[in-house]
Amino acid sequence: MNTAAVVIGNLGAYDWNARVYDTLALASRLAASVRDRANVLRIAYHLRELNKGLVRIREITNAAMEGKIKPNPNAEPVTRQTLRSNADNFEQMYRTLEYLLESLRRAGLANNSLTAASFRGLEGTIEPIANLADWFDVASQPEEVGRLFDRAKKERESGELIDLAQVE
């Protein structure tokens, strides 16, 4: 079983999904409320909560990767579809966060004293969320990844090396 499946298995698929969906829902509600810039205090509070949720997801993922979270022996087996679903969820979260950041910029809240720190925190979180989406996507395709590594090994053994400067 690959590391991504171990992470989800350790956390429990339903618990993991609940945490991801809660964070995605909060990001979506926040993106909707930024449009009218109705209440900067409420936006600042929700931004802070969103940042805490995203940091917690990263902490849990890292702890599971490092083996700090003990596996649940009663956990359901993780399927390729579960991994693919997680990749889709994180991709959606990434797009929502990207939209939210742009909305905050347009509303003039990127430099607002109440929201600027949380805005910067979101900017630092968006790339790791995209990386998690990619990681789950790759983990859901073990045969394809195996073929790529086999091909690379054969090319290296036969001397078909390409200078990275030539790759666009």
Image (cartoon, helix red, strand yellow):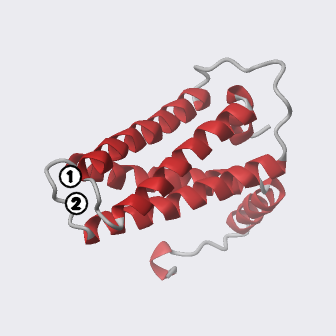
Residue 10, given in percent of the width and then of the height, sits at: 70, 27
Q: In the image shown, does 84 or 114 lie closer to the viewer?
A: 114
Residue at 31% x, 50% y: name it: 43
Outermost residue toward the left?
113
Q: Position of residue 103 (x, y in %)?
A: 34, 68
Q: Is residue 139 visible?
A: no
Left or right of 105 in this view: 19: right
| Mark seen at residue 116 | 1
Residue shown at the point (76%, 66%) measured from the top left: 151
**Residue contact at pointers 1 and 2, CB within 8 angstroms:** yes
Which sits in the foreground, 95 or 132? 95
- In the rendered image, residue 159, in percent from the top left (x then y), is placed at 67, 70
* Snapshot quadrant of residue 88: bottom right
Q: For label 1, count other residues whose C-alpha is less than 10 Å away and answer few (under 14), some (14-19) or many (20+).
A: some
Quarter-wise, where is residue 20 in the image?
top right
Quadrant showing the N terminus: top right
Sort mark 2 into few (<14), some (14-19) or many (20+) by Cα contacts within 10 Å.
some
**Which element carries disc 2, helix, strand or loop?**
loop
Q: Which mark is residue 110?
A: 2
- Reply above or below: 117 against 6: below
**Amino acid at the residue labelled 1:** Ala
Q: Give the residue drawn at x 71%, y 68%.
A: 155
- Left or right position of 144 against 57: right
Count of numbered marks = 2
Res. 40 visible in picture:
yes
